[in-house]
Amino acid sequence: MSIEINDVFRSFGHVLAVAGMSATVPAGTVTGLVGPNGAGKSTLLLMLAGLLCPDSGEIRIADLDPVAQPREVHRTVGWMPDAFGTWDSLTCLEILETFADAQGLDRAAGRRRCNEMLSTVHLSEMTHAPARVLSRGQKQRLGLARALLHQPKVLLLDEPAAGMDPRSRADLRVLLKDLASEGVTILISSHILSELEQMIDGAVFMAHGKAVHPPEVPVNSGDGPVSRLTGHVQRQWSMRALDPVALATWATDPQIGGQPAQDGTVVLRADDDTQAASLLRGAIEAGVEVVSFTPAMGLLEETYLMMEVERR
């Protein structure tokens, strides 16, 4: 149940939003869709969900054509936009039941499924509460429940964690991993890269309406432009020691090439984990009493910054 995108274009007037996008998202994986504002991510997700037609190119969702088979795609895909619009006068249960009816679920079975999903996203206590009293994070969780109602084989999520509290975000990570292990194909767009990295198996990087390969990041050639988070990127590491002066003296040796920071730590660069381990061993052997040694930022964020693409 993979996602296939082949040379897709979509314009809005004179604005070219998606410009020759091609990618393959492997079945049964959680894949990130990463790029700057204006890269065309939301437009692409709308086309994948069968809610917007491409001007040209071809899309296949679990072997279905969203243009020729929109109803079949709607039954197969769970779609969660970045903001879930609700009818404020309806309760959470009534909203989900409306979507269950639209998906053709049996009324009794649909109600059971609605209650099950409200429990899954920890909104059972809000079952009969009107949507107008929900917080932004609670509305996001309701949107996720709606996307999962019909047990989709493909899940498309646009900034799903926006407004969620830390516990809800942790629950989301576990839920997505569980769904992928059951064979659900998940494509998720988010600007919270440190958190996204904890959810995904790989990433499609997008800029100026098409997929791009970040420099020095290996690509799984069998899956199209899905970059695997394997760690083969020169990364910045932050080291802290009991004696900042001793640390700075060791780190600023030309052979080490470290850069002292204002907080008493030093920033070191390593091509891979092996080199990072060598740096740590060298510091300890030099008598530096190391307190912590961690990546300065996540691998996904570093990879994104390496792209050096312009925001639109």
Image: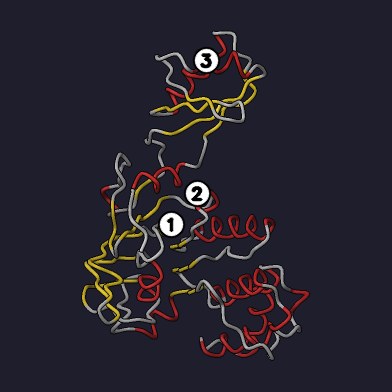
Q: Foreground residue, 306 or 174?
A: 306
Q: In the rendered image of this protein, does residue 102 appear above or below residue 293?
A: below
| Secondary structure of residue under mark 2 | helix
Proximity of marks 2 and 1: CB atoms separated by less than 8 Å: yes
Q: In the rendered image of this protein, does residue 45 appear above or below residue 227?
A: below
Residue 32, numbered circle: 1
Q: Residue furthest right?
A: 125
Instruction: Pinpoint residue 185: horizontal percent, then vertical percent.
Output: 43, 63
Q: Residue furthest front?
A: 262
| Secondary structure of residue under mark 1 | strand
Residue at point 30%, 46% (across, down): 219
Amino acid on which disc 3 is placed: Arg
Disc 2 and disc 3: Cα gap in Å? Answer: 27 Å
Amino acid on which disc 2 is placed: Glu
Residue at point 67%, 71% (across, down): 138
Amino acid on which disc 1 is placed: Gly
Q: In the rendered image of this protein, does residue 136 appear above or below residue 309?
A: below
Disc 2 and disc 1: Cα gap in Å? Answer: 8 Å
Residue 197, numbered circle: 2
Disc 1 and disc 3: Cα gap in Å? Answer: 34 Å
Q: Which residue is mark 3?
A: 281
Q: Residue furthest top?
A: 286
Residue at point 67%, 56% (across, down): 166
Instruction: Pinpoint residue 266: horizontal percent, then vertical percent.
Output: 54, 25
The quarter of the rendered structure image containing the C terminus is bottom left
Q: Foreground residue, 256 or 56?
A: 256
